[in-house]
Amino acid sequence: MLETVHIVLDFFDCPRSGVADYQGNPHYFSCDWDEATGDYGHSFSLFPINDQFMEIALAQLEISQQGVLAFSSGIYSANTNVGHRDIDQHYNQLQQLIDAFIKVLPASQIHLNGNFQRLQNDTELLQGVKRPFRVLWSSAV
């Protein structure tokens, strides 16, 4: 079953960390390092999250999206885009809270492969706005 990806925190070729549902409940996901290949693969560690983490991550996403919209409309230059780190104080404060939450997560008991799929109805999004995803979690072998 395809699950909702609420937030992509890190992206390289595909989402590498963020918040997505697993069995209908939001989880922080983080791509696992593959020692055999010396690279990140498609295996992820998943951690259940609380409402507070979700609220903080969504607030940061809102700042980022507002920055992209302001940049796209010419209000901000690339050097003053508030949707990027180290430019907006509130964004940075939220990032510190997210980092602190992630730092104290217990060892994950959930390890799954993630197949991320872009939603088809993404043609109206502005350049720079993260495209919405769904994910199909499957057993990591």
Image (tube, rainbow, N blue to C red):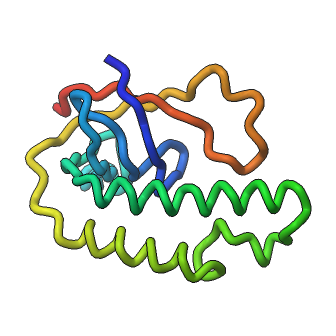
Question: Vertically, is 74 above or below 12?
Answer: below
Drawn side of residue 57 relative to residue 38, left or right = right
Residue at 39% across / 52% down in the picture? 17
Drawn side of residue 30 relative to residue 67, left or right = left
Drawn side of residue 82 relative to residue 49, left or right = right
Drawn side of residue 138 relative to residue 42, left or right = left
Q: Within the image, what quadrant is residue 94 found in? A: bottom left
Q: Quadrant of the N terminus?
A: top left
Residue at 42% across / 50% down in the picture? 16
Residue at 40% across / 51% down in the picture? 18
Q: Quadrant of the C terminus?
A: top left
Q: Position of residue 84 (x, y in %)?
A: 63, 70
Question: Vertically, is 80 above or below 14?
Answer: below
Q: Position of residue 138 (x, y in %)?
A: 24, 26
Q: Position of residue 20 (x, y in %)?
A: 35, 40
Which of the two residues, 63 or 21, is positioned nearer the viewer here?
A: 63
Q: How many marks?
A: 0
Q: Position of residue 97 (x, y in %)?
A: 35, 74
Question: Vertically, is 136 above or below 44?
Answer: above
Which of the two residues, 105 or 65, is positioned nearer the viewer here?
A: 65
Residue farthest right in this picture = 74
Q: Within the image, what quadrant is residue 134 found in? A: top left
